């Protein structure tokens, strides 16, 4: 039963990643989610859900390196996102 809850959270995160409202962020987060969210455990999905609460311009600035990632958002999931090649 616990896995069902985690699967629901994963599916919701993938949907939210593709439906942000800003096309560039949709593509970045959508492709990242397709590649990684399926393997996220509880801690990783919680960190990713927190990221999804942030504003698109902020996320885009962090990913493109035009703004530093705030300390509250730093961690393994953000490291994965920053290293992710959206073109692959």
Image: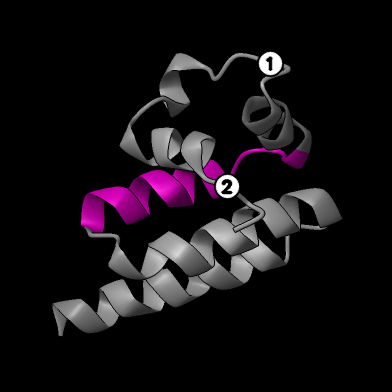
Q: Is residue 25 left or right of residue 83?
A: right
Helix, strand or loop at label 2? It is: loop
Residue 79: % across, % down = 41, 33
From the image, which quarter does the C terminus lie in?
bottom right
Q: Is residue 19 left or right of residue 4?
A: right
Q: Going 73% across and 58% down the picture, which residue do you hit?
A: 26
> Does residue 16 show up?
yes
Q: Residue furthest front?
A: 88
Up the image or down, 2 lies above or below 86; here it is: below
- What crowding class fits label 1: few (fewer than 14 Cα within 10 Å), some (14-19), or many (20 or more)? few
Q: Earlier in the sequence, mark 2 or mark 1?
A: 1
How far apart, in angstroms, are the residues tagged by discs 2 and 1?
19 Å
Q: Going 72% across and 27% down the picture, which residue do you hit?
A: 61
Q: Is residue 8 magenta?
A: no
Q: Quadrant location of residue 78?
A: top left
Give the numbered dot on residue 76.
none
Q: Nearer the viewer, mark 2 or mark 1?
A: 2
Up the image or down, 51 lies above or below 35; here it is: above
Q: Going 60% across and 14% down the picture, which residue do you hit?
A: 68
Q: Badge 1 is on which residue?
A: 67
Up the image or down, 58 lies above or below 20; here it is: above
């Amino acid at each position: 039963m616990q896995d069902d809850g985690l699967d629901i959270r994963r599916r919701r995160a993938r949907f939210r990643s593709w439906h942000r409202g800003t096309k560039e962020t949709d593509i970045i987060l959508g492709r990242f989610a397709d590649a990684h969210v399926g393997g996220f455990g509880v801690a990783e999905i919680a960190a990713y859900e927190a990221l999804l609460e942030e504003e698109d311009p902020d996320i885009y600035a962090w990913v493109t390196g035009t703004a530093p990632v705030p300390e509250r958002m730093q961690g393994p999931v953000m490291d994965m996102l920053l290293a992710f090649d959206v073109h692959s």
